[in-house]
Amino acid sequence: MAGLGTSRRARRIGAAVMAIGLAFPVASCSGKNSQLSGPEKTAIVVGAVPAVDTAGLFIAQQRGYFAAAG
């Protein structure tokens, strides 16, 4: 009978550890500021050589898409 009690106790402890382990990542992602604030504005410097592969970058810059997005 002692073996059954130990098994149940181990299961309860394991379940509690799992519940706590799952609660922390969820709680850390639910910040008030991340939901209320707008998109983060940062300065990005892009180094590109005028070539066929980067044509979209230069077209977007000429048409003002980056300035419109802030």
Image: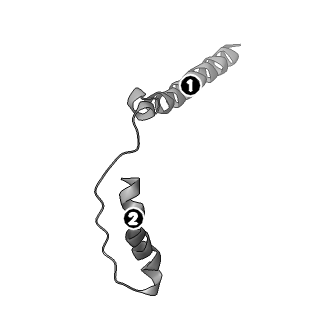
The residue singled out by tag 1 in the image is 19
Q: Which residue is drawn at 40% across and 75% down?
A: 58
Q: Is mark 1 on a helix, strand or loop?
A: helix
Q: Which residue is drawn at 40% across and 44% down?
A: 39
Residue 47 position, x and y percent, is 30, 74
Say if mark 1 contacts mark 2, CB within 8 Å: no
* Nearer to us in this view, 1 or 34: 34
Left or right position of 39 against 7: left
Q: Is residue 15 above or below residue 41?
A: above
In the displayed structure, 39 sits above or below 53; it is above
Residue 30: x and y in percent read 47, 29
**Spatial separation of the CA atoms under disc 1 and disc 2:** 49 Å
Q: Nearer the viewer, residue 62 or 42?
A: 62
User: Residue 66: horizontal and vertical position, in percent?
Assistant: 38, 61
Report the disc number at residue 64. 2
**Tag 2: residue type?**
Gly
Earlier sequence position, callout 1 versus callout 2: 1
Q: Which of marks 1 and 2 is in front?
A: 2
Using a 10 Å C-alpha cutoff, classify the residue at mark 1 as few (fewer than 14 neighbours), some (14 to 19) or many (20 or more): few
